[in-house]
Image (cartoon, rainbow, N blue to C red):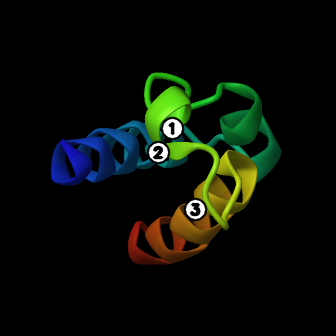
Amino acid sequence: MYTEMLKTIRDNIIKQVKEGKTLEQIQKSKPTKDFDADFGNGFINPDAFVQILYSDLSMKQK
């Protein structure tokens, strides 16, 4: 389930990056929401997790 969660969130963020959305827009779309109940209470909150992925994925899309 963990690997599937990572792939799903990654794919969601890549799609939005390709659409030209900003980090703030992507965070507002809550790409982690389906997994927050199980994984959203760790040492990295969902917005910080999205920021980390966005930083990496947006650089790879250029």
Q: Which residue is mark 3?
A: 54
Q: Nearer the viewer, residue 29 or 44?
A: 44
Please state the horizontal and vertical placement of residue 40, each as a whole percent of the image. 59, 43
Which of disc 3 and disc 1 is earlier in sequence?
1
Amino acid bearing label 1: Gln
Relative vertical location of residue 52 with respect to residue 18 in this rendering, above or below: below
In which quadrant of the rendered view does residue 9 lie? top left
Residue 13: image tag: 2
Element type at marker 2?
helix
How far across and how far down the image is residue 56, in percent?
A: 50, 76
Q: Is residue 2 left or right of residue 60?
A: left
For mark 3, give the secondary structure: helix
Structural crowding at the residue carrying mark 2, measured as other residues with C-alpha within 10 Å and reported as few (<14), some (14–19) or many (≥20): many
In-image side of 29 versus 33 (left or right): right
Kindly check if marks 1 and 3 are in contact, taking CB atoms under 8 A apart as contact: no
Q: CA distance from mark 2 to mark 3?
A: 7 Å
